Image (cartoon, rainbow, N blue to C red):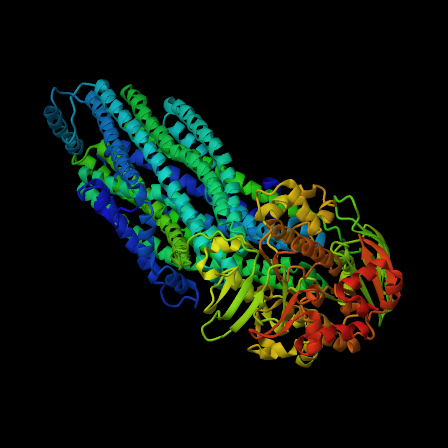
Amino acid sequence: MLLRLLRVRLAPYRPAIVLIVVLQFLATMAALYLPSLNADIIDNGVAQGDTGYITRLGGVMLGVSMIQILCSVGAVYVGARTAMSVARDLRAELFARVGTFSAREVALFGAPSLITRTTNDVQQVGMLVLMTFTMMVSAPIMMVGGVAMAVREDVGLSWLVAVAVPVLFVAVGLIASRMVPGFRLMQTRIDVVNRVLREQITGIRVVRAFVREPVEAARFGRANDDVTEVAVRTGRWMATMFPTVMLILNVSSVAVLWFGGHRVDDGAMQVGSLTAFLAYLVQILMAVMMASFMLMMIPRAAVCADRIGEVLETDSSVVPPVDPVQPSTRGGGLSLRSVTYSYPGADDPVLRSVNLEVRAGQTVAVVGSTGAGKTTLVNLVPRLFDVTSGEVRVDGVDVRRLDPEVLWSRIGLVPQKAFLFSGTVADNLRHGKPEATEADLWEALEIAQARDFVEEMTGGLDALISQGGANLSGGQRQRLAIARAVVRRPDIYLFDDAFSALDLATDVRLRVALAPVTTTAAVLLVAQRISSIVGADEIVVLEDGAVVGRGTHDELLETCATYQEIVVSQLTPEEAV
Amino acid sequence: MSAPETPGECGSPDSPGSAGAKSQGGVLRETERIQSGPGPGRGPFGGGMVAQKSLDFGPSARRLAGRLRPQRLKVAAVMALAVLSVGLTVMGPRLLGRATDLIFSGVFGRLLQGTTQAEAVANLRARGEGGLADMLSGMDVVPGQGVDFDAVARVLLLVLGVYVAAAVLAWLQGFILNDVVQGAVRQMRNDVETKINRLPLSYFDRQPRGELLSRVTNDIDNVSQTLQQTMSQLLVSLLTVVGVLAMMFSISPTLALIALVTVPVGMVVTTQIMKRSQGLFVDQWRRTGTLNSHIEETFTGHSLVKVFGRQREVEQVFGRENDALFAAGFGAQFVSGLIMPVMMFLGNLNYVVIAVLGGLRVANGSMTLGEVQAFIQYSRQFTQPLTQLASMVNLLQSGVASAERVFELLDAEEEPVEQAAPLATDGRGEVVFEHVSFRYEEDRPLIEDLSLVARPGQTVAIVGPTGAGKTTLVNLVMRFYDVDAGRITLDGVDIASMRRGDLRGRTGMVLQDTWLFGGTIRDNIAYGRPDATPEQLLEAARATFVDRFVHNLPDGYDTVIDEEGGSLSAGERQLVTIARAFLADPALLILDEATSSVDTRTELLVQQAMAALRSDRTSFVIAHRLSTIRDADLILVMESGRIVEQGTHEELLDLAGAYAALYQAQFAAAVS
């Protein structure tokens, strides 16, 4: 997945990558040339006592060093630019992908996981690309070049390279193969520790209320011991790595001097070449070591790449139509025809053959017990999900054949969880209608019974709302969410238990104020409180995903046992009659 | 790491360890300078913010080091082993150089005529090869004789032994250090855990949750990584620099001085680069944060973004932030990526200078070839740890900044220690408030002179607008906060004189914000009473109607849920938390908007089941929905921290006051 993911994303940067390879090649060659020049200094300068030669070659070495740094800096520049570009592109791709998702896919991954994938995971992959460009590319060049140069210095000693390189490779590989699973395990266990801490902090009141501090401490202690155990184990392998590599390197140097010494004595090799050979061997082994360390980064990045790939390869279950239909009319209301919906993998459908019709100017309410499928029903209208069978029509057209933008522009949704975006009150209210005037906003706030508290906020319409609306009470959030929908003056209002956090007096005032605005709109209302729905044109009673009653409040009181139970649960029998 | 601050602790001041320690202190001071001198002209946040945050670098680093104190014997062993191992490693090239000399002399000797070295020198001069003669006079050559391989073998065996010993010592050192570091990290995590359980609830209410979570997770992880990555390298690198310098001076003070020039030059260059890169990194992380919060908001409010047609706008903002992050990230990576090539260039410069000067000196006989070779090796070994030290400064800075944030948490004021004796009364949950006053903030009175009595078996309901102080009553009964004046008694005993654990063990609480931990539904219900039998658990689940929906889940009670609840709806989550409190069977049960997302029919059934099973226990119910509280034995109407009315449903309606008005609102709506 890592390779597949990167191959496609790196393709546009092919020229840059070629440039990096060329620059790294030149830089590496320059680095490799230095010991050879040094050997010349010794053999032709020092051994002959030719000081002029020594200084002249010194100048050449200086030039070569200059070339090396220029090429290296160039490679870092292009490498950093390319790697960060790839990360940027990946983020954009992920973000756009999630944008096409329906609520189903978002729920499948979970918003926090999608966030991590878009930020941290991409960061990891980006860093791997960067490291590859700045270090990894030069390692094989250094290895091949180093071997070539070493052999050029003396063929007779080259068998030493053939021994030392595999030995180092195997040693590092063996240690790394112990460490990598350790690293993975460590990451999962750190996640556990963090999860325990997170739960303890978010649930601090419950933990204390149930006097579970000792148990929680023990649970944490176990998680902590687990992570320490694997960290110690992995750390020990890590501690083995460095001395092992150094030992192999140093023993190789000793071997070069011993065997090289004999060759020098035999006259088969010059002393300068011996020194150069030594330098090359060290460079080769360093390159091997670097490559092995880099290889250790790959598993982690591979996990991240898998997680990124999962998102990119998930198709939205809600696909916009290729050839959208323009509805001929507006204000045609909303209808559900034999709508069935099952969550993926679930045996029982959440909604079973639900029929429902809301004409413009009508208010239809949906009631039912916890888990009856009310929220699912609401979410089908703006295509947050698509029906499993049956169809949802807006203005007489199946929503799956409408341009999503057109569909959404006609809907004002107030969800169960009143979510606000960071920004000012006005920003939030204008979400559905960017061109709304301040007067429009105040009017909507007045209808939503939110004028008073917005006026009291410092800055009024310009008061800042923190992320998620954390600086407001539940009731205030709900009223702003209602105002946001009202600003839009949509053809269809969807209220999903949107009055639950309001006290009764506010609830009543709000519905009275809402009436004139919704005279030409279709209103679909989910509520728990009978008082909120009693005035609806039609009330639909849902039970286990099926409609068990429909009619007005009075009709249902006569005909529907479930509705009676709901009413009785809220009013005393005398009041209900 | 504890060495620089307390050199006396880890060895005598004359030991080689303290030499390293001193220069380490120098590096740390250098760091401080970088930190506190962000330089003018950068953005209003940029470096300035970092400088402010890490202002206490010294003390915090010292304190972090101090956390290793319990393991000081091991730390001392690590120091000693590091000194020995680095010392041996540093000797290696010098000895290898001697072998080179032996070989070179052998080669030379074979070429020479004459019987003694002096004679050979004279011969060369006679032939006019003064240069060679000069060089030869600096060598130890027996003319006519080839390489003395016995001597070479002796030297090489010695080197081999030195290297093997160095490796073993280095391994031991790394092994012990690993234990030390992991032990310290483990202890730090445990300290944080203990601390969390000792902090008063007001701390958690005050501190933004995400911030606190970040401290206990990200920051501790960062500290642990910093310790793991820097501790061993820091020590070894410092010792190596010192050792290599010493060897270089012993070979040739002149060349060593030249090589030494690299140090200040390298320092200045890396400091300059890092000063810039640090600002850029701060920028990068800030941009990451901004982008992250934009992504978070968009993904969390995913459906709203869609339905309100904001996708395009959101993508525009994202594109802008994404580009900004790219620019910042590119800048930071490029500038910080310069350190390596630049240091390598300095190393190469060094190499060239030494090769040339060394070559000249060999040529005039003031140095041997082996010495030059050794010197070159040393100069390479010298720049590498310097580069490492430089790159570690960044890591250290961020690690110590994180440590500081963890220390802040560890230093937070704890709940007062309880001296009360354990209490063994077996009451039934009579709660009395006597003239209770309380405020969260000094200047904002919340609850003033409040009195109430809840008798065993009673259900007491509290209604009133947001901010009236309903939830505060719960906080006081549970002793999440302590009263400012007056007292609260449970079964006749002042709760302030009880242990919090005893008090809470006899109360149960369900809050509006459902909290479920990652685990099965069964585990979540059993949370309040781990020793409950399966029958008891099932009974609680039935009474709270959890049993009904659990049957529709694929794995029943073994269905795993997470913090976010996953497969459960808002109402179902609330039912699970009620089952949890129910199973714990407390003398006093508090429900704070616990059924707000549960439909009223289910709620009624739950209430009936509870009434039957808890006929002799006390319950507090807080709710907006009047249907939730209508059947309560006592209804308290609260406004601005006072009880304005109390009585039963009927009594309050007759009173025609605030409650009646609330109720009429509902009733009016119902009939209109």
The image position of residue B217, as x and y in percent, is 48, 51
The picture quadrant where one finds residue A415 is: bottom right
Position of B54 relative to B246 (above/below): below
Position of A512 relative to A228 (above/below): below
Seen in the image, is A333 located left or right of residue B311? right
Residue found 35% across the figure and 27% down from its top: A252
Seen in the image, is B388 located left or right of residue A368? left
Residue found 43% across the figure and 63% down from its top: B46
Residue B297 appears in view: yes
The image position of residue B506, as x and y in percent, is 54, 54
Seen in the image, is B191 located left or right of residue A560? left
Front residue of B43/B491: it is B491
Residue found 74% across the figure and 58% down from its top: A375
Q: In the rendered image, which quarter contains the C terminus of chain B?
A: bottom right
Position of B67 relative to B100 (above/below): below
Residue B214 appears in view: no
The image position of residue B645, as x and y in percent, is 62, 75
Front residue of B15/B516: it is B516
